[in-house]
Image: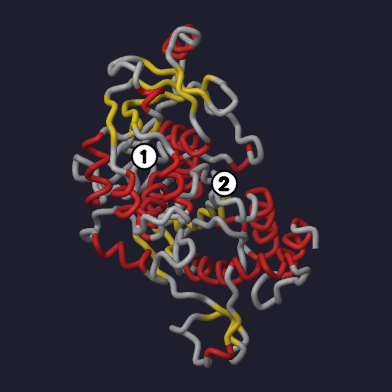
Amino acid sequence: MSHPDGIAPHGGQLINRIVTGTQREEFLSKADFLPRVQLDERAVSDLQLIAIGGFSPLTGFMRKADYDRVVEEMHLANGLPWSIPITLSVTEEVAAPLEEGSLIRLDDSTGRYIGVLQLSEKFTYDKAREAVKVYRTDEEKHPGVAVVYRQGNVNLAGDVWLLERDPHPLFPTYQIDPAQSRAAFREKGWKTIVGFQTRNPIHRAHEYIIKCALETVDGLFLHPLVGATKEDDISADIRMRCYEIMLEHYFPNNRVILAINPAAMRYAGPREAIFHALIRKNYGCTHFIVGRDHAGVGDYYGTYDAQYIFDEFEPGELGIQPLKFEHAFYCKRTLGMATTKTSPSLPEERVHLSGTKVREMLRRGELPPPEFSRPEVAAELAKAMKV
């Protein structure tokens, strides 16, 4: 589908639910009269992403028809692919007095008025079904499942409006929303753009697969996630600093745009890989890197399940091209980064460490080897972990 900014957003139109002018004044004037619902960090992220078009074609939190079909079949009720339920869950006590058809004031965790929901539907749902279908497990130790089990039993559905798009408190210069990223790609003359998602600090294996992808497209959209993550994940400010170091020393800056993805992590593995790809499509990417155990946690997903799931959709149905990469490592025989597709080495000739192993090394006061992490990045991580 053609679009003035290159690839069409998912569903064909970039959604904008940031309210302005008289409608905003009207909502503000009702601040003290509307029933209130307080959003947690993830719901705030979801509200923002709906409003800026990152979740196009969604205009609000999902109605039951969309929710059920997404959980069961990874499609919206209208047939468009979508893999993760976007819901606003509250307790029965909160839901009971709320009337369908009415406006609801949405507050953040500090009680600040940030948005409005036009409540079109209230519905209960089966948490165990959502857990098993979306996360492939009903174990509460899975961080995504734990969130589902903790949240309220009633989903509030309906269109939303965001009162104001505030600058990100930590990374205002990297807050590039979908309309802006699309304009930036157009300005640079990029026709093909590859998106890269991570919640971990960048290391040599990431660098290798990103650069392999960059050889085949016009530009790179480096798009680390800065929404809610697990407690033991390395914080967003440290990760962003690592990206800045890499761009300063190891990438051609005229072919890379670094921006933040305000989404929260779900840790839904394969389904989240589809979700991440569709978000990047909305930001204007034509290609998306899917690596080993994308958005995985623990041992819940097979190593390449997040790549196989793309084959469950019809060719062209997603509207963005996945670039599937094997696990990269430093090859001691060829003295460079490689994968099993390109390296003749034996397993003992390969250096590959997981993010978990690196965190353990840093906590022990050890720096990751240069085969794993660029020295400037290792030093930044060490400083952050107070080595």
Can you say whether 282 is above or below 97 in the image? below
Q: Is residue 325 above or below residue 168?
A: below
User: Which quadrant would the C terminus be assigned to in this image?
Assistant: bottom right
Q: Position of residue 60 (x, y in %)?
A: 35, 30
Look at 55% across and 52% down and name the residue there. 224
> Circle 1 — which element?
loop
Residue 200 rendering spot, x and y as whole percentages: 58, 59
Vertical comparison of 78 with 164: above or below: below
| Element assignment for label 2 | loop
Direction from residue 109 to residue 147 in the image, left or right: left
Q: Which residue is rendered at x = 36% and y = 62% of the image?
A: 322
The numbered disc on residue 226 is 2
- Identify residue for label 1: 86
First of labels 1, 2 by sequence position: 1
Viewer-proximal residue among 188 and 368: 368
The number of discs equals 2
> Separation of disc 1 and disc 2 at Cα?
18 Å
Q: Looking at the picture, which amino acid does disc 2 mark?
A: Val
Which is nearer the eye, 191 or 159? Answer: 159
Q: Position of residue 58 (x, y in %)?
A: 33, 36
Q: Taking 129 as reference, is 248 left or right?
A: right
Of residues 261 and 352, the one nearer the viewer is 352
On the image, which quarter does residue 133 sit in? bottom left
